[in-house]
Amino acid sequence: MTNTSPSPQNLFEANNIVKRIGTVVIADGVDIHVPAGSIVGMIGPNGAGKTTMLGIFSGNVKANSGTVVFKGRDVTSVAMAKRARLGIGRTFQIPRPFDKLTVFEHTLLAVQQSQSVSMSEAHERAIFALERCGLLKLVNEIGGDLRLLDRKRLEMARAVALDPALVLLDEVAGGLNNAEVGQLIEIVLSLRDSGISFLWVEHVIRALNATADRIVCLSGGHLIAEGSPAEVLAHPAVIESYFGSPAFMSTAS
């Protein structure tokens, strides 16, 4: 039987998560925990259900069964908006900024929609988040004109503006070149040093190698490996799950 009692050192716990979509098994009793102050990476082959799992954790996807615990509180039945107010932020795999809003307006709107704060505090949070994500020079740029890296940074800034304890990252390094991935790594590490923990779904293994304290691999509805990046990437079951995927193997080496 899975122990569903929250561990005092864990900021976030997902216990015995079961999720099926039709005949497809996304999770069959999956346990994931994120200690406070850590970066946990999640990898898995395409179609493994990693984004669906982030949806379960953030509250916009309902699991068939299992519990989600945040800061020692059972939030399994708590809606996404309230989880955000409690301190769970997330980014989305494909950034879709509004074409006519500025970078600042995007971040300010995120605060206003999710938090009950004064206008002055909302402004302060928006500026703080943009500074932490390297976007201060672009505050007046229009969202629709941003290059991919800046769209990804804007996704992160919108999450950071909510003053989260945990941010769920969904493939924010995807589509970036090596130099841009390096910039993203620096931002994530800086945010971690400021007290934000991360659960990071990613295919760009270089990013997780440089940041993650621990990696879990989801495949076939189960965590097939868990440990340090080196341990997981060398695990026979992980190698087998990615067999025939040269891009992964070359990136992981």
Image (cartoon, rainbow, N blue to C red):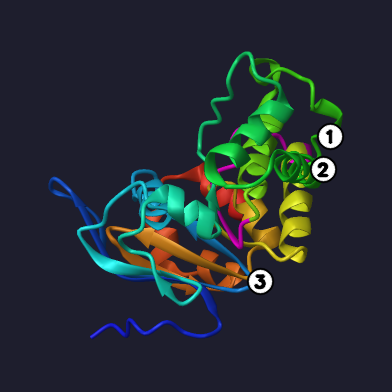
Amino acid at pointer 2? Glu
Label 2 neighbour load within 10 Å: few <14, some 14-19, many 20+: some
In the structure shown, which secondary structural element does the residue marked by tag 3 occupy? loop
Q: Which residues are magenta?
A: 164-179
Q: Are marks 2 and 1 in contact (CB under 8 Å)?
A: yes
Q: Residue at x 68, y 27 (%)?
A: 105
**Can you tell which quarter of the image residue 179 is in?**
top right
N-term mark: 2 or 1: 2
Q: Which residue is at the front of the view, 214 or 53?
A: 53
| Camera-nearest residue between 189 and 75 | 75
**Residue 244, image x, y percentages:** 41, 46
Looking at numbered disc 1 in the image, what kind of residue is underneath it?
Leu
* Residue receiving disc 2: 131
The C terminus lies in quadrant = bottom right
Element at badge 2?
helix
Q: Name the amino acid type tagged 3.
A: Gly
Q: Residue 245, image x and y in percent? A: 45, 45
Q: Residue 227: percent from the left, percent from the top?
A: 53, 75
Q: CA distance from mark 2 to mark 1?
A: 5 Å
Q: Looking at the image, is 92 positioned above or below residue 232?
A: above
Residue that badge 1 annotates:
136
Q: Choose top left, top right, bottom left or bottom right for residue 221.
A: bottom left
Q: Is residue 29 visible?
A: no
Judge depth for marks 3 and 1 and give the one in front: 1
Who comes first in sequence, dot 2 or dot 3? 3
First in sequence: mark 3 vs mark 1: 3
- For residue 37, the mark is 3
Q: Is residue 68 above or below residue 185?
A: below
